[in-house]
Image (cartoon, rainbow, N blue to C red):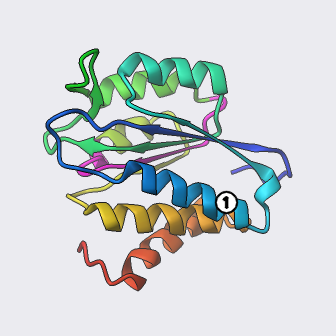
Amino acid sequence: MSDDNSIRKILILAAHPLGTDKLRLDEEARDIKEGLRQASERDRFVLHSEWAVRPRDVRRALLNFLPHIVHFSGHGAEDGGLAFENELGNIQLVSPEALAGLFKLFSESVECVLLNACYSEIQAQAIAQHINFVIGMNREIGDRAAIEFAVGFYDALGSGYSVETAYEFGCNAIQMAYLLIY
């Protein structure tokens, strides 16, 4: 992350396609927003959320908001791909290669991507070819643990910590809540 005092834009992209396990995406976004509002460096962050995200909505949000941090909340597929919604609200998987290609186009502005979804490590590795900091999950992660990770991560960022240290805070938040995922 930049060491200057410039504004950091965070884009939350949330998708919960029909027929997928229930997720508390609204709770996750609310808790992130609440934590940043209370943070010591709250004036350095602007948060924007997009809901029921389709693949084209991702591109549009990146073009319109030009975020520094992109946070995806939703489902990932064990064999690769993130679950977005199609025009009818059903699941539409987007491949790691397609995501990497999109983020390549935004490599000058996006500094960090957090994929808060099960099995998102494959996508994270692909995106990391173009973005400096990318976080993904290497297995299934429960909804409560995903929320705790996100809250710990953004609480630390909002307090001026680096992405690397914020990652450690996120992992510790899961442990502190005694939500074992290992």
> Which residue does the image show at 53% across and 17% down from the upper left?
60
Q: Amino acid at mark 1?
A: Leu
In this view, the residue in front, 39 or 181, is 39
x, y percentage for residue 163?
60, 59
Q: How many marks?
A: 1
Q: Is residue 118 magenta?
A: yes
Residue located 30% across and 29% down the image: 84
* Res 174 → quadrant: bottom left
Q: Residue at x 23, y 74 (%)?
A: 182
Read off the residue under disc 1: 36
- Report if residue 121 lies within the magenta region: yes
Helix, strand or loop under label 1: helix
The percent coordinates of residue 124 (x first, y second) are 37, 44
Rendered residue at 50%/51% (across/down) = 29
* Magenta span: 108-122
Which of 36/77 is in front?
A: 36
Q: In the rendered view, would you say 115 is above or below 141? A: above
Q: Position of residue 57 (x, y in %)?
A: 45, 20
Tell which of 58 and 89 is nearer to you. 89
Where is residue 177 shown, x and y percent of the image?
38, 81
Specify the quadrant of the image occupied by residue 137: bottom left
